[in-house]
């Protein structure tokens, strides 16, 4: 029996709330019954209204970090796929789905199951033609491995819905799609998909692609029954991150481990919240100031750089191959400003959080406590991961405004 099964409690309040509800009625119910949801949404609205600046370490954006480059993407095929989406939409759906490139909805993505920002069209509400066209757009844009990762996240979400009898809220298609700008082989445009445990923000210009911010999560991380039995997410990110921490010399383990406990009494109030837990770069954190923490790569022997790049590769799996190679070189260029930090224990069984941070990338990995599963402490079967491009790199912002 998979470990998460012992924490599946169909009588828990959270599971009871989702049963028999659709996405709208469930969200409305939580707004009535859970004060934290109201507080969270109020905070989101405040942050969303701020002009975009970008994630920084000190409030100052470092300029000229993201050059125009050739990522060798198949832009004509991606444009064709996007146009197929547009053609399949009804006029009402077009009004909801198509937005200017600078529309504020680009920054309105979020990863909970809550259906708060109802922008675009939701895939479990569209016809088969629209659904198939959106899947083809994803397949045309992402790497093969990245497309499979996204599909696995969506399948696990559907698996969770079946586990808790809440499939009208949690299913493989409970995600919203938007297109920004006019699909073009020469002008900038983009698309985004967001929903429970999967959020991808894509910017395209000629043969260049930016996929950032991204959020990928799963509760549980494994499907243990049904047609997709054996599907699993985050094993490489988990094992490689743990290997990095365990290989550090003891004095540097102390430096990397910024907090010993996952919800450490020494944490300041801002450092933990019930929704994001240890994450600090998630939804609506576009302008957050995140100082460097932990150990710098310059303090380590060269083998750690190779290991760190193996970790980053997993976080950037959505990128097509040449785009990833270009991104890899960009990250290496800033290796002397790259930091690794850790929260929690680092035995083979401990849940943990880690962050990789440089001027051009932030990767966050966090084991969470249960939401629909009843574990009150973080466990390895509920994982969240985030990728950001600091200093105004998210959403292709610097390329649009260069």
Image (cartoon, grey):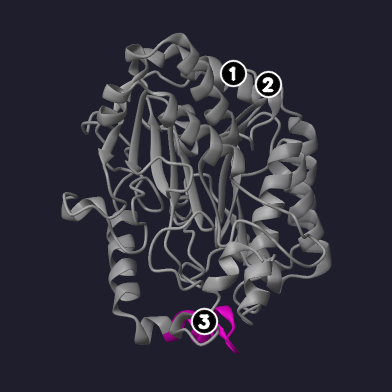
Q: How many neighbours does mark 3 have within 10 angstroms: few (below 14), some (14-19), or many (20 or more)?
A: many
Main SS, magenta region, reads: helix
Closest to the observer: 203 or 227?
227
| Left or right of 135 on screen, residue 35 | left
Mark 1, other Cα within 10 Å: few <14 / some 14–19 / many ≥20 = few
Q: CA distance from mark 1 to mark 2?
A: 6 Å
Name the residue carrying label 1: 326
Q: Name which residue lies at 58% across and 86% down.
A: 19
Determine the secondary structure under disc 2.
helix
**Membership of 183 in magenta stretch:** no
Label 3 SS: helix
Magenta residues, start to end: 15-29
Q: Residue at x 34, y 18 (%)?
A: 337
- The residue beneath circle 2 is 322
Residue 61 in view (yes/no)? no
Seen in the picture, residue 20 relative to 185 is either above or below; the reply is: below
Q: Is residue 222 left or right of residue 132?
A: left
Mark 1 or mark 3, which has the lower sequence index? 3
Cβ atoms under marks 1 and 2 closer than 8 Å = yes
Q: Quadrant of the N terminus?
A: bottom right
Q: Are marks 1 and 3 in contact (CB under 8 Å)?
A: no
Whether tag 2 and tag 3 are in contact, CB under 8 A, the answer is no
Q: Position of residue 288 (x, y in %)?
A: 28, 43
Q: Is residue 27 magenta?
A: yes
Label 1, label 3: how many angstroms apart (C-alpha)? 44 Å
Provide the residue designation for mark 3. Answer: 15
230 sits to left or right of 102: right
């Amino acid at each position: 029996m998979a470990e998460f099964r012992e924490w599946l409690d169909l009588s828990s309040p959270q599971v009871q709330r989702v049963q028999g509800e659709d996405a709208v009625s469930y969200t409305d119910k939580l707004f009535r019954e859970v004060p934290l949801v109201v507080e969270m949404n109020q905070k989101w609205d405040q942050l969303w209204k701020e002009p975009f600046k970008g994630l920084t370490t000190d409030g100052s954006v470092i300029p000229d970090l993201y050059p125009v480059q050739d990522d060798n993407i198949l832009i004509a095929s991606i444009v064709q796929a996007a146009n197929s989406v547009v053609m399949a939409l009804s006029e009402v759906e077009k009004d909801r789905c198509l937005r200017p490139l600078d529309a504020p909805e680009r920054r309105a993505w979020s990863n909970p199951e809550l259906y708060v920002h109802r922008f675009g069209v939701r895939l479990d509400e569209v016809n088969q033609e629209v659904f198939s066209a959106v899947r083809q757009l994803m397949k045309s844009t992402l790497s093969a491995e990245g497309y499979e990762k996204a599909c696995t996240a969506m399948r696990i979400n559907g698996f969770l819905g079946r586990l808790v009898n809440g499939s009208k809220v949690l299913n493989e298609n409970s995600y919203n799609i938007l297109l920004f700008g006019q699909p073009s082989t020469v002008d900038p445009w983009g698309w985004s998909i967001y929903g429970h445990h999967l959020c991808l923000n894509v910017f395209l210009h000629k043969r260049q692609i930016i996929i950032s911010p991204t959020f990928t999560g799963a509760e549980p991380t494994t499907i243990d029954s049904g047609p997709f039995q054996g599907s699993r997410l985050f094993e490489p990110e988990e094992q490689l991150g743990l290997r990095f921490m365990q290989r550090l010399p003891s004095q540097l383990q102390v430096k990397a481990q910024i907090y010993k406990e996952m919800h450490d009494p020494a944490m300041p109030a801002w450092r933990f919240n019930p929704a994001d837990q240890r994450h600090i770069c998630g939804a609506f954190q576009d302008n957050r100031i995140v100082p460097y923490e932990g150990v710098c790569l310059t303090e380590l022997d060269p083998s750690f750089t190779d290991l760190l790049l193996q970790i980053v590769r997993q976080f950037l799996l959505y990128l097509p191959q040449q785009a990833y190679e270009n991104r890899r070189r960009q990250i290496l260029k800033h290796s002397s400003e790259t930091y690794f930090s850790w929260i929690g224990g680092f035995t083979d069984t401990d849940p943990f959080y880690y962050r990789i941070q440089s001027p051009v990338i932030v990767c966050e990995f966090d084991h969470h406590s249960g939401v629909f599963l009843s574990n009150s402490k973080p466990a390895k079967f509920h994982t969240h991961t985030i990728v950001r491009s600091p200093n105004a790199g998210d959403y292709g912002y610097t390329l649009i405004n260069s």
